[in-house]
Amino acid sequence: MIAAALAAVQDRINEAARAAGRDPDSVALVAVSKTHPAEAVEEAVLAGQLVFGENRVQEAKAKFPDLKARFPQLELHLIGPLQTNKVREAVALFDVIESIDRPKLARAVADEMARIGRKPRLLIQVNTGREDQKAGCDPDHVDSLITVCRDQYHLEIEGLMCIPPAEADPAPHFRLLAEMAARNGLSVLSMGMSGDYPAAIRAGATHVRVGSAIFGHRDYA
Ligand SMILES: *Cc1c(COP(=O)(O)O)cnc(C)c1O
């Protein structure tokens, strides 16, 4: 079932990319496995999926070390908010951290990367809808955060990530993120989820984060 869902999502990615005049290989699928067990991730790996996203450090730590030992090419993205007291675990486990959103966090990540000699790739999360309850850097502070990361902490930022407001048309948020990335010379754009990834691909997404369309409904109980 997961294999069939993955194939269907990949087909839609390819179709959206071609319709936008883009190479389908320029869009990476991050399979979001939060709340789903390691067995579901394994099923996806056996179907050929190697890139996964988790939004909680603790949950990822419980599921992924074994999977990574068995499938060394597996690539794990942190897509949820990161507290400074979890930085040590996050830098040790994740291959990409998509949720850098403030100087203090950038500094803690830089210190830990230097300490253990591991370099996860980094994206800045932008709160494009300026929602109070949502993590992410204010759009007005993105340029300066990129500069601080680079000049003060010697961190290479690869790109930007956003989660548009749930009820809004996501397209303007995707375009805003693409503009902010372009003016800062960043090539990676992580945007688009199960409900809107074709629109994100039209706006230039290089990574789409798709959970429920692959793994099914999430049960938080
Ligand atoms: C859960 C989550 C997703 C995936 O959402 P779906 O609607 O299930 O595809 C993508 N991005 C982030 C940051 C998430 O937390």
Image (spheres, grey):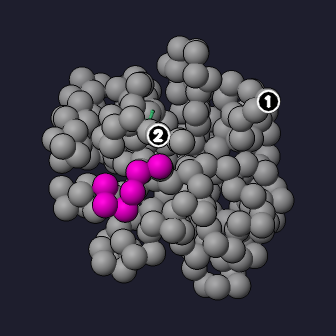
| Residue occupying image coordinates x 52% and y 63% | 60
Residue at the spot of label 1? 132
Residue 77 in the figure: left or right of residue 83: left
Task: Measure the C-alpha gap from mark 2 to mark 1.
Answer: 25 Å
Q: Is any part of residue 123 visible from this angle?
A: no
Residue 22, image quadrant = top left
Q: Is any part of residue 34 visible from this angle?
A: yes
Query: Would you say the beta carbon of the disc 2 residue lies within 8 angstroms of ligand 1?
Result: no
Residue 172 in the image, given as x and y percentages of width and height: 56, 18
Residue 99 in the image, given as x and y percentages of width and height: 64, 51
| Residue occupying image coordinates x 75% and y 27% | 130
| Segment tinted magenta in the rendering | 35-40
Q: Is 109 above or below relative to 9? A: below
Three-letter residue code for mark 1: Asp
| Residue occupying image coordinates x 45% and y 62% | 76
Q: Does the magenta stretch include residue 103?
A: no
| Secondary structure beneath label 1 | loop
| Residue occupying image coordinates x 31% and y 61% | 39
The disc label shown at residue 202, or none: none
Between 93 and 56, the one lying in front of the other is: 56
Circle 1: is it few (<14), some (14-19), or many (20+) Cα within 10 Å?
few
Return the disc, 2 or 1, that comes first in the chain's sequence. Answer: 1
Three-letter residue code for mark 2: Asp
Residue 111 in the image, given as x and y percentages of width and height: 75, 76
Residue at the spot of label 2? 219
Q: Does the magenta stretch include residue 36?
A: yes
| Secondary structure beneath label 2 | loop
Q: Is 71 above or below relative to 159? A: below
Judge depth for marks 2 and 1 and give the one in front: 2
Q: Is 188 above or below relative to 203? A: below
Residue 161, image quadrant = top right
Q: How many labels does the image show?
A: 2
